[in-house]
């Protein structure tokens, strides 16, 4: 007798192609609207599902995991980041956690370069002028909206993993000098490929860069890695860009530095806390804010779904999911 299909609950509305294929493969409960599940809905799902498909808006903490039913085998995260899931608690209770690494690399690196260009060349300010009343633009002027060239500038990459290296490839093509700080130094051949200079001291690298790109994950070790002290080390004409996780930067300290002119600008696609937490940043002209668009391409979101389904199917066949997250990765 064949075993029944896995019971899968999806916490957010996913691309239609992904949902259709999931419906064919599993006994799936889909989210009809695009709102996040409440805590009560998450708890109910974890008490009945074999697999819970989560997104970064779902805070799966220790109490929720403790309340899960014995049938819950896998938390299959739709996304590469997993700092919103208590992985160690899940591991201790025999619940596996998987993610979708790799598929967002190129899109996130594209967005990083877009933010660097947007901040250095003041693109949003120019766009605002052209979208306002016609009389607000007096025509071309030699001194209007002067930005900064990026060719020849020093780019410091904090976190030289898949995405950091993809950013390095793009920056090199734009004529930037590539520097990086990483938990471990890369192989010399990789450094040579990217023309990248390694800095063992983050403080020393930060103090010398024209642009700093945050591309490391959020872990206990990287929380507020860019704190008030390190932000003060940056040059006054430097800019910082973050497409990774908001918690890596002390956001309150960043706002103070931007307001005081201690650093020239910032481009942010991720934030620490909710909307109220970055309200102050909205008022600053030297900041470009995006609504977490790093992986927002149709291709990436479909490929993320394919990764989720592969992890679930591998589990269903009695094997270890290929994208398993283990506590040692934290």
Image: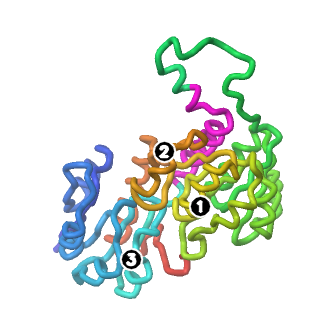
**3 or 1: tag closer to the N-terminus:** 3
Do we see residue 6 in this rendering? no
Q: Quadrant of residue 26?
A: bottom left
Q: Which residue is mark 3?
A: 96
Q: Which residue is mark 1?
A: 253
* Quadrant containing the C terminus in the rendered view: bottom right
Q: Are marks 3 and 2 in contact (CB under 8 Å)?
A: no
The numbered disc on residue 282 is: 2
Q: Label 2's element? A: helix
Q: CA distance from mark 1 to mark 2?
A: 15 Å
Closest to the observer, 75 or 330: 330
Q: CA distance from mark 3 to mark 2?
A: 39 Å
> Horizontal and vertical percent for residue 301?
41, 48
Q: CA distance from mark 3 to mark 1?
A: 37 Å
The magenta segment is 103-126
Task: Kindly identify the residue that appears in the image at 28 percent across and 77 percent down.
Answer: 64
**3 or 2: tag closer to the N-terminus:** 3
> Horizontal and vertical percent for residue 52?
29, 67
């Amino acid at each position: 007798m064949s075993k029944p299909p896995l019971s899968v609950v999806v916490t957010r509305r996913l691309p239609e192609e992904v949902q259709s294929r999931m419906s064919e493969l599993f006994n799936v409960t889909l989210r009809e609207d695009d709102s996040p599940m409440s805590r009560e809905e998450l708890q109910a799902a974890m008490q009945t599902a074999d697999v819970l498909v989560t997104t970064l808006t779902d805070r799966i903490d220790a109490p929720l995991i403790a309340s899960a039913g014995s049938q819950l085998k896998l938390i299959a995260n739709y996304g590469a980041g997993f700092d919103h899931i208590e992985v160690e608690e899940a591991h201790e209770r025999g619940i596996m956690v998987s993610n979708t690494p790799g598929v967002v690399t190129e899109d996130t690196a594209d967005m990083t370069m877009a933010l660097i260009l947007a901040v250095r060349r003041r693109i949003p300010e120019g766009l605002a002028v052209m979208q306002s009343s016609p009389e607000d633009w007096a025509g071309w002027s030699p001194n209007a909206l002067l930005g900064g060239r990026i060719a020849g500038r020093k780019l410091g990459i904090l976190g030289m993993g898949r995405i950091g290296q993809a950013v390095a490839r793009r920056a090199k093509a734009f004529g930037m000098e590539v520097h990086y700080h990483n938990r471990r130094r890369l192989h010399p051949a990789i450094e040579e490929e990217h023309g990248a200079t390694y800095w063992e001291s983050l403080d020393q690298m930060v103090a010398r860069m024209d642009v700093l790109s945050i591309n490391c994950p959020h872990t206990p070790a990287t929380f507020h890695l860019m704190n008030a002290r390190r932000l003060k080390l940056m040059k006054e004409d430097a800019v910082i860009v973050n497409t990774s996780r908001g918690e890596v930067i002390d956001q309150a300290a960043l706002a103070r530095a931007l307001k005081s002119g201690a650093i020239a600008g910032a481009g942010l696609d991720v934030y620490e806390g909710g909307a109220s937490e970055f309200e102050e940043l909205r008022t600053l002209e030297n900041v470009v804010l995006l609504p977490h668009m790093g992986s927002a391409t149709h291709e990436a979101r479909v490929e993320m779904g394919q990764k989720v389904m592969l992890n679930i199917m591998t589990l269903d066949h009695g094997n270890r999911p290929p994208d398993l997250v283990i506590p040692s990765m934290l």
